[in-house]
Image: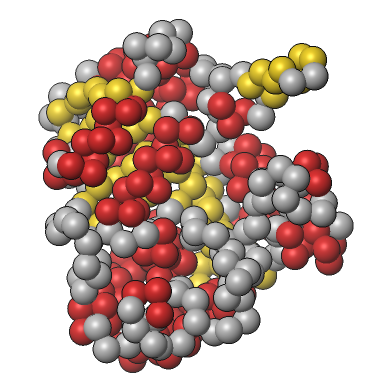
Amino acid sequence: MSSDVSAVLIEGDGIGPEIAEAVVMVLDKAKAGVEWERMPAGYTALLEHGSTLPERTLTAIREKRLALKGPLTTPVAGSIEVGSDFKSVNVQLRRTLDLYANYRPVRTVPGVKTRFSDIDLVFIRENTEGLYSGLEHEITDGVVTSLKVATRKACTRIAEFAFEFARREKRKKVTGVHKANIMKLSDGLALECYRAVSKKFPEIEYDEKIIDATAMALVMTPEKFDVLVMENLYGDILSDLGAGLVGGLGLAASGNFGALGAVFEAVHGSAPDIAGKGIANPTALLLSAVELLRFCGKGEVAQRISDATLEVYREGKTLTRDIGGSASTMTFANAIAERV
C-alpha cells in the first residue's frame, strides 16, 4: 500500500476537531498522500445524528479498513444528561470491528523532562474481552456482579500478535502480565496461551510478571521491560502508566488492529475545558497518524514526520502550553510542517 490511501477521519469531541485539523495539515504538507473521509462519532454525533456511532461510520471503516480517530467523550455513569445508556464508542468500535489488539508504543520525547531517559516500551493489550466484556448484572439492590471473560482464542491471538510484532521489530523480550495467583482460571488460561505461543519464537525471551509487581517495577526500573502483553483492563491501566513515564497521554500514539483493518487514535481525553481555544497539543494524534502511515507502507514519510516532530521538541522553542511553551495548536503544527 505504498500508493495513495483513503482513510476515515473521526475528528472526535472537545479538542478533537482542532487537533485533527492540525494533523491533516501536517500530513498534507508532507505529501503523505492520504485522502480523508470525515465521519461522525461520539457525544457530538449523538446530538447531531442520534447515535454515538452511526451505522454509516461503521460502514465507511469496514470499506476503507483504515481510520484515524480523535478523542471521544466517555462519561462516568451518572455524570452526563444522556444517562447510563451512553456506551463507550471506543469499546463499540473494538467489538463491532473485532479490533482485538491494542498497540501502545511509549518512547522518550527529547526536550520533555521526565524521571527517566531512553524509555522505549510497547504495551500490547487484548481488546475484546476481560472485564470490559460489559457483562454486568444487578442481582439485588446494592449487589452487582461483573463477569470477566477469557477465551483460548482471544488469549492465543493476542500472544501471537505480541510475539510477531517483537520478531518483526527485532525486539528482545516479551513479558506476560497477569494475576494468575488470584484469578487462577481466567489469567491461568492466558498464561497457558502465552507460554504455548512463546515456544514458536525461541529467539525472543519470554517472562511473566504479576500485574501489581509490574506497576511497581515500571516506575522503578522501566528499562527491564521491552514488549508487554496482557488482558484488557491491565493493558488499559499499565499503558497509561507507561505514557506517564514519558510525559503523559498527550505524547502517546495508539493503534487497534484486527483481521479486517486498523483504527489509530489519540487515547487522551476530549478536554472540553480548553476546546475552541486553539491551545491543545496535537502530538498524540499526529504520532498515531505516523503509525497509520507505517501500517500503510508509507514508512519514509512517516519517519520524516516523526523526525520533524521530535526536532521541534528538541529545540523547545515552539511548544504548546501543556509542555511549558506558549505556542498555539496550529503554530506548533506549522513548526513541524516546516521541518518536514
Residue positioned 65% across, 57% down in the render: 73
Taking 175 as reference, is 287 above or below it?
Answer: below
Indicate whether 234 appears above or below 58: above
Residue 183 location, quadrant: top left
Relative vertical location of residue 215 with respect to residue 262 in this rendering, above or below: above
Q: Quick check: can you spot residue 24?
A: no
Residue 259 percent coordinates (x, y): 52, 39
Q: State how many labels appear.
A: 0
Q: Find the residue positioned furthest to the front.
A: 142
Q: Quadrant of residue 102?
A: top left
Q: Relative to residue 82, is residue 151 drawn left or right?
A: left
Picture coordinates of residue 167 (x, y %)?
Answer: 22, 39
| Quarter placement of the C terminus | bottom left
Residue 91 spot, x, y in % from top left: 62, 42
Viewer-proximal residue among 242 and 103: 242
Q: Nearer the viewer, residue 167 or 269?
A: 269
Residue 271 left/right relative to 288: right
Residue in view at x 21 percent, y 52 percent: 120
- Residue occupying the far right of the picture: 50
As drawn, 318 above or below 236: below
Q: Is residue 258 left or right of residue 114?
A: right
- Residue nearest the viewer, comparing 45 with 220: 220
Question: At 18% across and 42% down in the image, what residue appears?
Answer: 220
Q: Quadrant of the N terminus?
A: bottom left
Which residue is at a point 74% across and 21% down the rendered structure image? 142
Residue 58 appears anywhere in the view: yes
Which image quarter: residue 188? top left
Figure coloring: secondary structure
Percent of width and height locating residue 257: 48, 44
